[in-house]
Image (spheres, coloured by chain):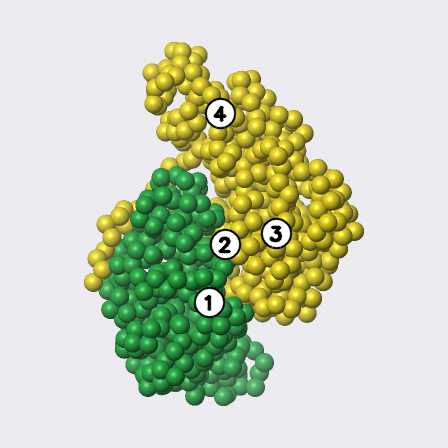
Chain colours: A green, B yellow
Amino acid sequence: MTPKPKSLLTKLDVPTKYLFSAGITNMSTRVKAAMILPLLSQSDPQFQQILKDITEGIRYIFQTSNRHSFAISGPNCLAFETAISNLTETDDKILLMEHGADGERMAKSSKTLTRKLIRLQVANPGDLVDTEPIKQALTAHQPKVLFLRHGDTSAGTLQPLRGIGALCRKNNCIFMVDASATVCCAPLSMDKLEIDVLIAGTQFALGLSPGLTLMSFNDRAVKAISQRKCRISHTMNFDLLAQSWGLTGDEKVVYHYTPSISLLYALRESLAEVVDEGLDKMIERHMKFSLVAQKEISKIGLKFLVEEESKRLTSVLVIQVPDSIKRDAIIEYLYKYYNVIISSGIPPIDKVWRIGILGQNANRSPVKLLITVLRESIQLAKKSEGESSLRSPSTISSTIE
Amino acid sequence: MTPKPKSLLTKLDVPTKYLFSAGITNMSTRVKAAMILPLLSQSDPQFQQILKDITEGIRYIFQTSNRHSFAISGPNCLAFETAISNLTETDDKILLMEHGADGERMAKSSKTLTRKLIRLQVANPGDLVDTEPIKQALTAHQPKVLFLRHGDTSAGTLQPLRGIGALCRKNNCIFMVDASATVCCAPLSMDKLEIDVLIAGTQFALGLSPGLTLMSFNDRAVKAISQRKCRISHTMNFDLLAQSWGLTGDEKVVYHYTPSISLLYALRESLAEVVDEGLDKMIERHMKFSLVAQKEISKIGLKFLVEEESKRLTSVLVIQVPDSIKRDAIIEYLYKYYNVIISSGIPPIDKVWRIGILGQNANRSPVKLLITVLRESIQLAKKSEGESSLRSPSTISSTIE
């Protein structure tokens, strides 16, 4: 018999963390309370009502009236593949607009789905894609889908979206956006921007444990899907997703798969928190505390990868590591002495720190803590240049008053 | 502006439910406590240790020494598609052994992945597949994969597995089993039974909120995967899954996608609970209270779809609805007056009740409650024949002493 693993003889214990990572952040008390509510079976009328509430909530935070708004029980890459495999057929062209390091994954993903790929990349990390090359690429290649991320968390860039929707319509192209890093923390209106498909993970400003991805499809997208001829994965089947969320209009709910019930409770409550605060106010709060953090980070003498403030993503700040300082020494110091978590860079943009100002942490006290310990660690690093790691806070208290 | 949805102005409240459904059951206190622990970023060493603990735990409950044992962040159908799309190529043959109503979904799924399908179906619901037809099908068709579910929750059947592994090896076929309904509640040893790929949802005996699926691949399966030539979805890519779980042997952990952190905490604790109780004792407890329930259900005068006790799945009991009684009236009565949830049948096996004796509910008090209210509802139904719904318990208290 395979023996009992010893590592499981202890109870899991996780200390309080201050999660300023480039994606995952701390959960609110209300969201946590929802996660441990008694489970319901899927066919329970109360559970069906929760799905309806979530659909309404997604419409509100995406600013759309799209009937087909729901959450899948899976990561962002599953949502990306779900959208692409429903919207396009083998050998269809996808235009991928990249303003960061994350495009590589989407590119591979599109290729494995046997779609043809056109990549529109920026010259330097921190740059944005201009309208003119988009126009040219759309006209020259006539892609079926244009995909971009509104906010890029590897370079810390915010891609302007105005005008792209209109260009896509003119070229009979579906405009698809990932707004994980901007939904509820930067102005975004799906309908006004003529976005056809919008997807967003729930671990950013919504502050949930990962595991769900929000999706919304407008009538143009639904029409494109209805014309699809090639076969599609059961898990990713759009019609089954819509039917299981009761979105087909005939009130008949079809079993598709067993969804993440507790995470859906959490999502329902997180959306209710947005409604309580008001979407505008929530965005305002995120922008305000991001600006506070940016100002203080500049005061420390650090520079952002994106110099121009208007091009900068506010929810995830990407900071250049000065030549004299070791990137990981700072990350380790914050982790070891304060349980403050920040992220490192994603290759090739790796000589950076990435800091999320998200959800509950977009507030006065968390930002104060972050800046204080960041300043302390930088000062200490300058003093201990050449040493492999930073000294403990206690040994330097007199020097950082 | 899309207005605030009114349905989200209230806080979510879910009363205590006694979930005897055919899959989802109540979570334990320890599992709930784990779900609200502070989130960790994926790169945190403590999170990496949690993944290692889970791998050990899966090896223990599957009774295997397979290195490639992990959990995907998605439903069972994603695990099925992950296994099939990694193990087989376009036009490869899959032998689907079906002893219930659920096969239709797997059949569709296999077809959408453009695999060729051979179906081995039983003549009547409640029957099992014999060894002889399996032998014949393997020899005649030489499929790449044979897939079956150990326990079928639609018919309440338990398929004997002994001998099938050897037949598969003889025919150069991969033996793949879904053990969602039996893992930790019926005897099952992956290695002894020569199962090459084992998958299992976490919402049955493990008692978690759904959202994760356990998977384990032995060396035969890994070898088959390594010979695959066709492209594969990013989300379902076996190599990336193994790399992100640190299972490649070189300790290098690669980012694949952001997993369901809180659900993985819960899984870790649920596996630790199995270790604390002991796998043998946990299986024994499930069998014991299932037998108690079966005996009492027979005493009420109800019959199981599977007459022969040895062929009966113990974790989900499938009970025939007597002609004189309305199926849904009983389900509604238990739900309305006692918050006790049982499931209805899946077409075409729909004139049944399905009752899960799973996880925490495989215990004296829950089973006592279940039997008491089931007996009450049946007695009441017999008295109120012809009426559209059952009277409330208060009006019949004198009659059911």
The residue carrying mark 4 is B321
- Tell me the amino acid under the disc marked 3: Leu
- Tell me the amino acid under the disc marked 1: Glu
**Towards the viewer: A258 or B183:** A258
- Secondary structure beneath dot 3 equals strand
- Secondary structure beneath dot 1 equals loop
The residue carrying mark 1 is A89
**Towards the viewer: B78 or B32:** B78
Residue at position x 38%, y 78% in the image? A142
The residue carrying mark 3 is B117
CA distance separating discs 4 and 1? 46 Å
Label disc, if present, on residue A10 of the rendered structure: none
Residues at marks 4 and 1, common chain? no
Select label 3 or label 4 by which is in front. 3
Residue A258 in view (yes/no): yes
Report the chain holding disc 3: B
- Tell me the amino acid under the disc marked 2: His
Residue at position x 37%, y 16% in the image? B384
Give the x, y percent position of residue A19.
44, 65
Residues at marks 3 and 1, common chain? no
The residue carrying mark 2 is A234
